[in-house]
Image (spheres, rainbow, N blue to C red):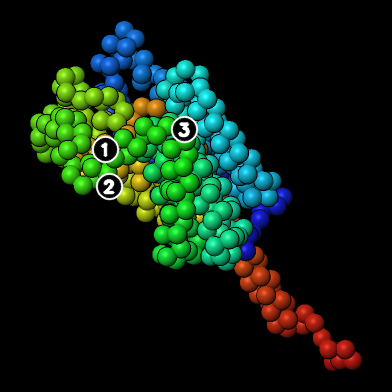
Amino acid sequence: MGKQTELKNDPAGLDLAIDIPFLSIVAALMVFGLLMLYSASWDVSWHANRDVNSFFLRQLVWLAIGLVAGTFFYFMDYHRWEKNRLATLAILGTVGLLFLVLIIGERSLFGGKSVQPSELAKLVIVIYLSVWLNAKGEMIKKVSFGIIPLGLILGVVAGLIAVQTDLSAAVTVFALGLLLFYMAGGSLMQILILLFTSSGLGAVIVTIKKPEIYGRIQDFWVGIQDINTFGSDQIARSFTAFIDGGWFGVGLGKGVAKLVLLPVPHTDSIFAVVGEELGFMGSTVLVVLYALLLWRGMVIAKKSLDGLGSLLVAGLVFWIVFEAYVNIAVIIGLLPVAGNPLPFVSQGGSNLVVTMSAVGLILGVARLAELERRKQERRSLGAVVDLRGRDRRGSVPGFSRPSGTKRS
């Protein structure tokens, strides 16, 4: 991994140095998401609370919390996750919360659906594995020092999530772990060993706590083999919405599928609402925005100061885009129903807050890299100016004379 570079007591550290392209893409996704959420949620909001605005206003509250969290992580030096053992404390706290909801018997804390530790686990697993893999270096390729410990980490976290019947989050955790291990230098064979180790441990946890989960896993696998055998009603209803939308849609707020056809149109099925109201063109815009987010995230990862920054950014942006495309693939019938939210668009407090926290972390990595680049430019410029000044002083006639020279 690259050598870590720190910015200590640098006045320029107060500079925002925001990556404007990445922030612009996120802003576009947020505006798009809020518009679609209001359109998709007013009916279910009315039936639930006799207020067409209640779900939308709740999302705004969570967005405000997410912006605060994202701002905090933006100004935080990401090396603190490694130096102050914050990553270790974070993963221990997250595992503790997963055990807590397991004892409670619910997926959420505080009796609601918006505070889900499984969402937090996705963010924390990226942070912890990035720090862990960066610290291990080449030792991750050794079975006893790298593959088995990493398999235990993934197996425990994913297993605890799976017993809460949140299989999509468990799959996401596995995918993130394998991606980060590959980016850190793992080979294909090592990845297969890691997958076998982690999934085996996860299966043990599921068997002990909730063996009935295997029914859902079997249904999911059947759905992978034949999409028509799993979730056909939801997929058929989604297709109907897309067909009604055509190329340009029926108009924002004018769709009817959210009223009579789609289950949970404001969460898992919201992309079908996009297809009906904004049509193929509007859906394509959303798909392209996620692709641009991935592209810009990879640019930031490449420009980061060190290996830790690269792993963090790549893992976080992959997680966001992975969930988005899984949700879209389910709605258009390419995958069986998985329950993944559509980041920035679906209603959900936990997902929105952790996603905005990830955005803050990514922009924070970009910020430190940009400040370091500016510092190097100032040093180079100062060296050039100093060199020219010395040359100029030595070349001015009469400015200096060799010793022993007499005036004529």
Residue placed at 53% from the left, 53% from the top? 150
User: Pointer 1: what residue?
Assistant: 219
Residue placed furthest toward the top: 50
Could you classify mark 2 by the number of other residues whose Cα lies within 10 Å: few (under 14), some (14-19), or many (20 or more)? few
Drawn side of residue 243 relative to residue 306, left or right? left
Residue placed at 59% from the left, 64% from the top? 139
Q: Of residues 273 and 340, which is closer to you in this image? A: 340
Residue 128 point in image, percent of width and height: 56, 47
Q: Quadrant of residue 91?
A: top right
Asked if the residues shown at circle 2 and circle 3 are in contact, with their CB atoms under 8 angstroms apart, the answer is: no
> Where does the N terminus fall, quadrant-wise?
bottom right
Q: Compared to 325, does 403 lie above or below?
A: below
Going from N to C along the chain, the mark reached first, 2 or 3, is 3
Numbered disc 2: secondary structure: helix
Using the numbered discs, state the Cα–Cα distance from disc 2 to disc 3 in whole angstroms.
41 Å
Front label number (1 vs 2): 1
Circle 3: residue type: Lys
Q: Of residues 190 and 138, which is closer to you in this image? A: 190
User: Pointer 3: what residue?
Assistant: 209
Numbered disc 3: secondary structure: helix
Drawn side of residue 170 relative to residue 84, left or right? left
Q: Compared to 284, does 245 lie above or below?
A: above
Q: Compared to 407, does 331 lie above or below?
A: above
User: Pointer 2: what residue?
Assistant: 288
Going from N to C along the chain, the mark reached first, 1 or 2, is 1
Using the numbered discs, state the Cα–Cα distance from disc 1 to disc 2 in whole angstroms.
31 Å
Residue placed furthest toward the right: 404
Residue placed at 50% from the left, 28% from the top? 102
Could you classify mark 1 by the number of other residues whose Cα lies within 10 Å: few (under 14), some (14-19), or many (20 or more)? some
